[in-house]
């Protein structure tokens, strides 16, 4: 079952959404988590393996899109807890969503603070990682298995599909 959850987390990292919106009265908030995609096969797989529901949305001059999400607060929490160990991109949003879901509704200021934090994280995560957007790139390495002296670090690609170039990345001082 962990394989399915890790696959779901990868889909959620790339195609998922964590959103806290304001009700029309501007005093109450609501949380939505889900996955948007144009592939109906994916939606059927999500339903078969994790339940929930999906809806379709037609847009002029675009492909039909599908939006899947868990139904109900408990299922949403189970979804977030299931993908959390595997998330990379949306990990902080998922943690904030869990905090939001578990807090008392009587603290609207704190709930709105979480809404604004998620909004900022979502805004920051849509920037493209082009060379122009990353002027000061650094290598971040942690863990006991990495050499303490970075000039000794050599990382060879484990990709096997491109035999023409066999790329090798070397970190030199």
Image: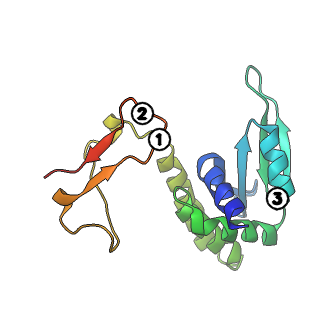
| Residue under the point 72% across and 76% down | 105
Check contact, mark 2 vs mark 1: CB within 8 A.
Answer: yes
Question: Tag 2: Cα neighbours inside 10 Å, few (<14), some, or many (≥20)?
Answer: few
Circle number at residue 139: none
Which of the 4 image quadrants contains residue 59?
A: top right
In front of the other: 73 or 29: 73
| Residue under the point 39% across and 29% down | 164
- Vertical placement of residue 93 versus 158, above or below: below
Check contact, mark 3 vs mark 2: CB within 8 A.
Answer: no
Question: Tag 3: Cα neighbours inside 10 Å, few (<14), some, or many (≥20)?
Answer: few
Q: Residue furthest left?
A: 173
Q: Residue furthest top?
A: 61
Which-is-in-front pick, marks 3 and 2? 2
What residue does disc 2 label? Answer: 163
| Mark 2 vs mark 1, CA separation in Å | 7 Å
| Mark 3 vs mark 2, CA separation in Å | 37 Å
Q: Under tag 3, what secondary structure? A: helix
What residue does disc 1 label? Answer: 160
Is residue 92 visible to the viewer in this orientation of the structure? yes
Q: Under tag 2, what secondary structure? A: loop
Give the x, y percent position of residue 111.
Answer: 62, 69
Which-is-in-front pick, marks 3 and 1? 1
Tell me how the rendering is colored: rainbow
Q: Earlier in the sequence, mark 3 or mark 1?
A: 3
What residue does disc 3 label? Answer: 49
Give the x, y percent position of residue 169.
Answer: 29, 45
| Residue under the point 55% across and 63% down | 91
Check contact, mark 3 vs mark 1: CB within 8 A.
Answer: no
Q: Earlier in the sequence, mark 3 or mark 2?
A: 3
Give the x, y percent position of residue 93.
Answer: 57, 62
In front of the other: 88 or 119: 88
């Amino acid at each position: 079952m962990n394989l399915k959850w890790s696959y779901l987390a990868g889909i959620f990292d790339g195609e998922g959404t964590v959103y806290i919106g304001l009700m029309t009265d501007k005093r109450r908030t609501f949380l939505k988590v889900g996955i948007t995609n144009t592939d109906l096969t994916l939606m059927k797989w999500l339903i078969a393996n994790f339940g929930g529901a999906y809806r379709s949305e037609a847009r002029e001059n675009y492909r039909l899109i599908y939006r899947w999400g868990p139904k109900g607060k408990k299922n949403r929490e189970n979804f977030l807890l299931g993908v959390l160990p595997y998330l990379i991109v949306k990990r902080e949003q998922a943690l904030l969503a869990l905090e939001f879901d578990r807090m008392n509704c009587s603290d609207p200021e704190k709930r709105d603070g979480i809404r604004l934090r998620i909004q900022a994280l979502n805004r920051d995560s849509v920037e493209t990682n082009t060379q122009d957007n990353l002027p000061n790139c650094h290598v971040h390495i942690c863990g006991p298995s990495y050499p303490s002296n970075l000039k000794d670090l050599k990382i060879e690609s484990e990709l096997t599909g491109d035999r023409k170039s066999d790329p090798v990345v070397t970190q030199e001082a």
